[in-house]
Amino acid sequence: MKLSIIIPVYQVEAYVADCLRSVLDTSADPASFELVVVNDGTKDRSMELVRTLTTGYGNVSIIEQENRGLSAARMAGLAEAKGEYVWFVDSDDYLSSGAVSSVLGELSREPVDLLVTPLLWNYPDPARDYQDIIVPQPVSLDGKTYLRDGQYRVSASVRFVIRKAILDPRWSFFPERHLHEDEYFDRVLLYRASSLRILTKPLYHYRQREQSIMGGKDIRSSYDIVRIYRLLLQFMESEVAVEDRDWFRKRCVEVLTLSYCHAYPGFRTRQFRRFLRENRRFIIGEYRKCCALRPARMMAADLFFLYCPAFYVRLADLRYISF
């Protein structure tokens, strides 16, 4: 079997039918792929819809577990996946028409460690929709180059069709009970991928909704991003070659500074002020390790934002720090 599509399900009865239809309504040979649905203890009608829509499909399996979060659900699906490749699909998103057939055709034509699909970001207001990677023709390179150069979007993991053999259990995991686990997984994944191909056609519709993990913003996001960054440092110390550590740290510090952005507009709240007291010195110290060649004016603006975000945003737009 070539491909396993893993779909965790939790409280998505308004969306899961679209997701399943986009996977199952395909001309691809059913023997070439499987659908692994993980019921993460959902309390709504999601699984009733799953069972109705997958009746009669011999390439569908369902895993039942108590609610443990997206990370654990993905890993449970991965443990049961039989395909040479795996594709994590979120149950409130959906695939483009013919996506499964397109992926199988690409993998048969030229096997790689990763296929990278641009994401179509879909908003409640369609005027905001956009495609996040645009290339005129397929691009082939290695994962380190993709990550180091910073030219293409890294997160989220749903953009990657992954050769399962490169998922070394020592490092390839989604940290349980953490938000933004993709920020860890995707950087580790790319560092270990020897070959990848970026597709021109977007195959994945990345639905943005306010109550989703990515749509909602609260102080837990800020704390979890700091924890994710510390996990990336552990990976760097144990797995990243010494000559790669400077650029790898930069790609990770970008994640760390998002701990501010995910708290906006609550910079003046008591919770965020407490977060700053506990983490600002660490965050600025890590930033300083990466800013030696930063233009002076840009570095000054970065530090102004990191020291005094509530005052900074009174004068300028929210700052996304990248290297």
Image (cartoon, helix red, strand yellow):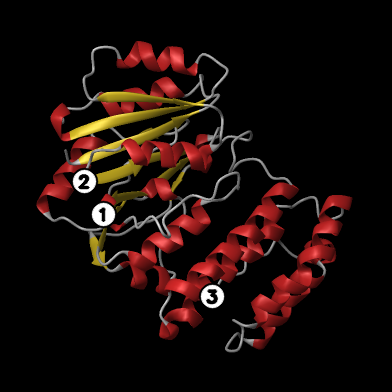
Name the residue tied to disc 1.
165
Question: Which of the 4 image quadrants contains residue 297?
Answer: bottom right
Name the residue tied to disc 3.
250
Name the residue tied to disc 2.
84
Is residue 281 shown left or right of residue 126? Answer: right
Mark 2 touches mark 3? (CB < 8 Å): no
Question: In the image, what residue type sits under mark 1?
Answer: Ala
Is residue 76 shown left or right of residue 261? Answer: left
Q: Give percent across and percent down for residue 150.
A: 44, 70
What crowding class fits label 2: few (fewer than 14 Cα within 10 Å), some (14-19), or many (20 or more)? Answer: some
Q: Is residue 200 visible?
A: no
Q: Residue sitting at 40 percent across and 45 percent down?
A: 158
Q: Which-is-in-front pick, marks 3 and 1?
A: 1
* Quadrant including the N terminus: top left
Mark 2 touches mark 1? (CB < 8 Å): yes
How far is mark 2 from mark 1, CA to CA? 7 Å
Q: Which-is-in-front pick, marks 2 and 3?
A: 2
